[in-house]
Image (cartoon, rainbow, N blue to C red):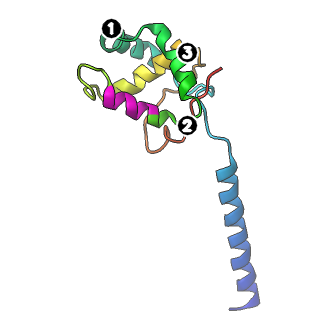
Amino acid sequence: MTSARYTLVKLSAAILTMLVGIGSSAEPRTTIDAVYSKQQARGGERLYQVHCLVCHDKKYFQPVLEVWSGQSVGTLLQMMSATMPESDPGSLRDKEYVDILAYIFSLSKLPAGEEPLENRGTKLDEMVIATP
């Protein structure tokens, strides 16, 4: 291998290592970062009234999110969809669970943003629950 090519390979490896380090050291997005929209929360409120309110008072969720603080939003969503509603777990569509979660965030005084919360890829698994 020529000296110039060897140097280029080493430089490329160093840049790649630096970029990986930057990506892994970045702070994860949290629920305080305005991760849902007000419109989405309004839709989630309607679903909540039909599917959740019979068992879960609106004041129920703020302490629950405090307990979940530091855990991934994806894990909470998986738990919700696997166990709720209690009368028919897993019966809602994925988007409905996400919209209800957006409403729960609004009940817990988490800030709303412009974009709706979406469950695509590992996005929610990488998002951390935080409370104000």
Q: Residue at x 44, y 12 (%)?
A: 42
**Helix, strand or loop: magenta stretch:** helix
Relative to the observer, which residue lies in front, 111 or 11? 111
Relative to the observer, which residue lies in front, 79 or 37? 79
Relative to the observer, which residue lies in front, 54 or 109? 54
> Mark 2 packing: few (<14 Cα in 10 Å), some, or many (20+)?
many
Say which residue label 2 marks.
127
Q: Residue at x 50, y 33 (%)?
A: 73
Asked whether the viewer can see residue 38, the reply is no
Quadrant placement of the N terminus: bottom right
- Tag of residue 54: 1
Q: Residue at x 71, y 66 (%)?
A: 15
Q: Residue at x 68, y 46 (%)?
A: 26
Question: Which of the two discs, 1 and 2, labels the residue nearer the N terminus?
Answer: 1
The three-letter amino acid code for the residue at tag 3 is Ser
Labels 1 and 3 touching (C-beta < 8 A): no
